[in-house]
Structure formats: C-alpha cells, structure tokens
Image (cartoon, rainbow, N blue to C red):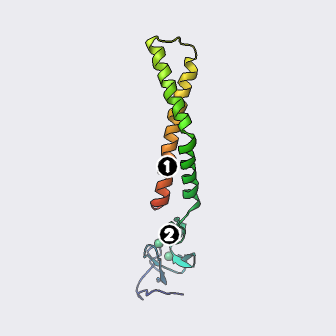
C-alpha cells in the first residue's frame, strides 16, 4: 500500500532489479516490497526501523531515563566518593612530606583511586544521559 508518490521507474537500491513500491519516511530511500518494514504504523527501510526513535514518537526512551536517574543519583551519592578521594590524596601528600607515619598508606591509595573513579563514573553517566536525551540517541 503505497501512500507516497513513487516514480514508476524507481528501483530498490538494494535490489536494483525490483521496482520500488514505497519510500522510507525517515531516510527517503526507495523500497521494494521485500524491503518495506513498518514500525509504529510508518513505512521504513530495515536500517531506519532498527534505529531508536527519540524525538517525535518516543520522547522518553527508557535508556535515557535510566542514565539520567543514575547521573542524578551519582551527583547526590558520589560526592562521598570524591571526598574520600580528596582526603586520601591529602593524607598521601602528608605521608610523602613525612608529616605523618605511613600507617594506612595502602587504604589511602585505595580511597584516592575510588574517589577518582566515582568522579569519572559520574561524569560519564551525566554525559551519556544528556547525549541520549538531547542528542539523537544513537550510540
Ligand atoms: Zn530509511
Ligand atoms: Zn529491496
């Protein structure tokens, strides 16, 4: 059921020997009968049908929502990790200056490492969430 004007001499780009019967609403490719795929009651090529819908039909994709929630949670919870990292760094500096003994140095190193890791995780989650939500959602 062709709803758009398809020139009678148009052929499917994937199957040049077959006549086009419809046009992908997303990318405008000609489609032969076997290439026509429908999604959300719209005719699309297979590639477009597989790509995520973001703006018009699915403004809140679950992945974007999950990432944003994780990002916000990270903002609330992970400062504890950053604090541990900064305090671990300070204590390691004191140990390096000989101001305090080296007792617990191993734990301070871990605290510093985990703190930086939590900072990196938070930034990545926020960026990924923002990109999925406001970008085109393709990763
Ligand atoms: Zn397409
Ligand atoms: Zn085809």
Q: Quadrant of residue 10?
A: bottom left
Residue placed under numbered mark 2 in the picture:
48
- Taking depth in this image into account, of 19 and 132 the one nearest to the observer is 132
- Residue 93 coordinates in the image, percent (x, y): 45, 19
Q: Is mark 2 within 8 Å of ligand 1?
A: yes
Q: Is residue 76 above or below residue 89?
A: below
Tell me which residue sits at (51%, 34%) in the image.
82
Q: Residues within 10 Å of mark 2 (few under 14, many from 20)?
A: some
Q: Which residue bears the numbered disc 1?
A: 126
Along the viewing direction, whichever of 36 and 117 lies nearer the viewer: 117
Q: Position of residue 81 (x, y in %)?
A: 55, 34
Q: Tell me which residue sits at (53%, 23%) in the image.
A: 109
Could you tell me if residue 46 is visible in this image?
A: yes
Q: Secondary structure at mark 2?
A: helix
Can residue 18 be spotted in the picture?
Answer: no
Q: CA distance from mark 1 to mark 2?
A: 27 Å
Note whether 102 is above or below 52 in the view shown.
above
In the displayed structure, 28 sits above or below 90; it is below
């Amino acid at each position: 059921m062709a709803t758009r004007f398809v020139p009678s001499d148009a052929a499917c780009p994937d199957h040049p020997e077959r006549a086009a019967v419809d046009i992908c609403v997303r990318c405008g490719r000609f489609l032969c009968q076997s290439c026509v795929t429908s999604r959300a009651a719209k005719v699309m090529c297979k590639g477009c049908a597989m790509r995520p819908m973001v703006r018009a039909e699915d403004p809140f994709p679950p992945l974007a929502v999950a990432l944003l929630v994780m990002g916000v949670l990270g903002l609330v919870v992970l400062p504890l990790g950053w604090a541990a990292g900064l305090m671990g760094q300070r204590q390691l500096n004191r140990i390096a200056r000989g101001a305090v003994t080296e007792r617990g140095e191993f734990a301070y190193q871990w605290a510093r490492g985990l703190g930086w890791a939590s900072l990196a995780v938070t930034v990545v989650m926020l960026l990924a969430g923002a990109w999925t939500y406001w970008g085109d959602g393709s990763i």
